[in-house]
Image (cartoon, rainbow, N blue to C red):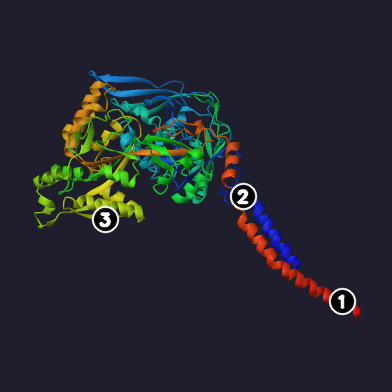
Amino acid sequence: MIQQLRHALLILFFSTTIFAQWNNPHHESTSHNTLHGAFSSAPKTLDPARAYSSDETQIIAQIYEPPLQYDYLKRPYQLIPLTLREMPTVTYVTKNGKIIYTIYDLKIKPRIYYQPHPALKTKRELIAQDYVYQIKRLASPTVNSPIFGVMSKYIVGFSDYAKTLQNAYQHKSFINLHDYPLAGATVINKYEYHIKIHGVYPQFLYWLAMPFFSPMPYEADLFYAQPTMKEKNITVDWYPVGTGSYLLEKNNPNEEMVLAKNPHFRGEKHPVSNESIPQVEKLVLSLDKESIPRWNKFLQGYYDRSGISADSFDSAIQLDKNGNPILTKAMQEKGIRLETTVSPSVFYIGFNMLDEVVGGNNKKLRQAISITIDYEEYIQLFLNGRGVAAHGPIPPGIFGYEKNNINKVIYFWNGHNAKRKPIEDAKKLLAEAGYPNGIDPKTGKALVLNYDVTSTGNPDDKAQLNWMRKQFAKLGIELNIRHTEYNRFQEKVRTGNVQIFSWGWLADYPDPENFLFLLYSANGKVKHGGENATNYTDPRADALFNEIKNMPTDEKRLIKIREYLALVQEDAPWIWGVHPIDFTLSHQWVSPTKPHAIANNTLQYQKINPMLRAQLQEKWNKPILWPLWILLGFLILIFIPLIVTYWKRENKTTVKKYWK
């Protein structure tokens, strides 16, 4: 009995002493110089020739280095050299007074080295040949790069090169791309290479700041081509090799991904403090699928930065008297900071212009629906006000966006404010389109339109879809929602088997061309496999686009953009949707950073105070011990009578034995 009590008390004692560590989700001490974050789903690839989604590029941008990067501080966004000694020299080749080729001369810095990697037996230096090799990979049928279609229009000989590689792979499982010359990408010497493109394409420089144009050493390609590597799923998709400030130390997307300092990184200086970068030793990203657990760990101090889900918005944000978002008192007391930036993106509802009902010349039907879908209400209901209603394809922060240049098809000026036109205007347009009160003259019943979505089935999706039905019902139109799994949905859009659908675009680079090309007929999804998902075609819009894309950023270009926007607003191939506003929270131990909506290689500029973090984590996660002390008292009250009884019984037995 005494032994059992001793065990119970020992268990209780150790419970109280170690309880403070039980809610810490991290394996190592948080006093280390490690940044902690979360991801909700695993990236599909880390191959720089294939990765295109934001969750992928945010990882590989710390590992791979294209020749150019964005200046961390300057606004508007400006390109500067990353691995180059200077900005590329541009030469134009003319014929009969017309520019037929543009040649970019790129000279890289010496003494840049790759991370340690088993494919590289020695400390491998970056050379020009590695950049050319990667450009060739973009045309490889074994890679299937998403930008092959775009680049084949520009890089000289790119389409033919892809055919050459296709034929070569019919006879070999692996080929050395160095053995197959590409006219549009040539090595000049160890530290210099040329890229040759057709005509003039000023935006090509922006592509040179994207991971697609990062270097790939031939040795790594050969290493991963080994049959034993493929059998074990050890590929460049999951095991990157780069020259950047970080390397991927651990890649377990079912648990966590860890970036650590590249010991071979050459070192750079912070543009403000002039301190050596990178400053954070590691970045640990933990798989955390649910928003509420992620939020709780942020509040406990176990994640350093966080977005704000709809579930947590009211506890984090309140509006001041002018309607501006500010932190709640609870957030301010924790020393948390709020950063807000309008995302250079647009999320819209598209009309398939090949559809016989909503497409073609039926612009009055599209205009009526566009007026009716109240995106101001949508932003308040489902985004907690975190968005700007779109008037066209160009988001705020990109040249060509003008707050006062409203979409006059949908809005009118009410004093100094743009106001959505009344539903009566939409009903009038609907009647002119041949559907009075939403009645389809072919059936005598309500017009039925199909809306394809990739709904996950969660309550938020259901609420949004019910809201969308009600919007169409204002016009008497019945909305038939067709739920489709993601891959099937993509296929339906590719083949034009949709009528109305949701889509979006995040800027590749800060130029209006990167948004206007979404409505260029030569980029039609069905006919050309491009990014014009609505398959919109208009010769006037195409002619304006071809003028705008190569113009310098000046007043003349702005005038042309205004003309273009008025045209597509009239045709209404999109319900223009929303430009999201990103809210980011940072704990006080994270040094302030300057948000950059385009660049992804910004981890190297971040700095933390791990000792302050450890102190506040201890303060915020003190165990509540009084229930345990009550339990201890309860156990004592129970065990004392038992001990007394036990002692008396043992003592009585001893006395009896003595007298015998």
Q: Is residue 636 above or below residue 409?
A: below
Which mark is drawn over residue 36? none
Neighbourhood count class around disc 2 (C-alpha, 10 Å): few under 14, some 14–19, many 20 upward: some
The count of marks equals: 3
User: Going by the image, does 493 lie left or right of 122?
Assistant: left
Q: Which residue is mark 2?
A: 20
* Precedes in sequence: disc 2 or disc 3: 2
* Camera-nearest residue between 645 and 47: 645
* Precedes in sequence: disc 1 or disc 3: 3
Q: Which residue is mark 1?
A: 655
Q: CA distance from mark 2 to mark 3?
A: 49 Å
Whether the residues at callouts 1 and 3 have beta carbons within 8 Å, the answer is no
* Residue 376 shows in the view: yes
User: Going by the image, does 92 lie left or right of 23?
Assistant: left
Q: Nearer the viewer, mark 2 or mark 1?
A: 1
Q: Nearer the viewer, mark 2 or mark 3?
A: 2
Q: Residue at x 21, y 28 (%)?
A: 562
Residue 139, percent from left and from top: 37, 38
* Precedes in sequence: disc 2 or disc 1: 2
User: Going by the image, does 161 lie left or right of 215?
Assistant: left
Q: Amino acid at mark 1?
A: Val
* Residue 360 shows in the view: no
Which mark is drawn over residue 482? 3
Q: Secondary structure at mark 1?
A: helix
